[in-house]
Image (cartoon, rainbow, N blue to C red):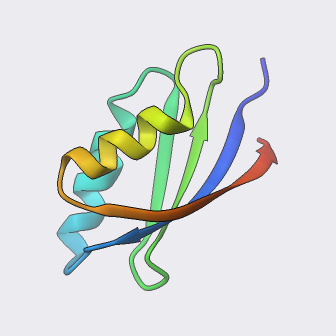
Amino acid sequence: MSKQSYRLHVEGMGCRSCVAKIEKAVHALDGASCQVDFAAKTAAVTLDPQRSNIEEAVGAIESIGYSVTEWSEQGEA
C-alpha cells in the first residue's frame, strides 16, 4: 500500500525540544511518521491513507500548542 507525503509549515517552535514533541505527537497516529526541520520550521509527514489522514496529523500538532499555517501534498512516498 502506498503512503502519502506532506510538507507542513509549523509556527511556534522555540527550541529543539519542540522537534521531539511534534514528532512524538504525529508518530502516535496509526501509520504515520514525521521528520521536523527546526531551521526551516517544517515537518515532513508520511501517512498511510488507510490508517490516518492529514487532518489528524495537523490536529495532533495543534493539540500540543503549535500552529500549522499551511501544508501541501508531496505525492506518494
The residue under the point 44% across, 40% down is: 57
The residue positioned farthest toward the bottom in the image shown: 39
The residue under the point 42% across, 46% down is: 58
Residue 76 relative to residue 24: left or right: right
The residue under the point 43% across, 85% down is: 39
Position of residue 10 relative to residue 47, above or below, is: below
Image quarter (top left, top right, bottom left or bottom right) of the N terminus: top right
Where in the figure is residue 59, as x and y percent of width and height? Answer: 35, 40
Q: Quadrant of residue 25?
A: top left
Q: Nearer the viewer, residue 47 or 35?
A: 47
Q: Quadrant of residue 20?
A: bottom left
Position of residue 44 relative to residue 15, above or below, is: above
The tally of labels here is 0
Q: Nearer the viewer, residue 11 or 77?
A: 11
The residue under the point 54% across, 38% down is: 54
Where in the figure is residue 71, as x and y percent of width and height? Answer: 59, 59
Where in the figure is residue 69, as x and y percent of width and height? Answer: 45, 67
Residue 40 relative to residue 7: left or right: left
Q: Nearer the viewer, residue 38 or 64?
A: 64
Image quarter (top left, top right, bottom left or bottom right) of the C terminus: top right
Where in the figure is residue 47, as x and y percent of width and height? Answer: 59, 33
Position of residue 41 relative to residue 31, above or below, is: below
Residue 7 relative to residue 39: left or right: right
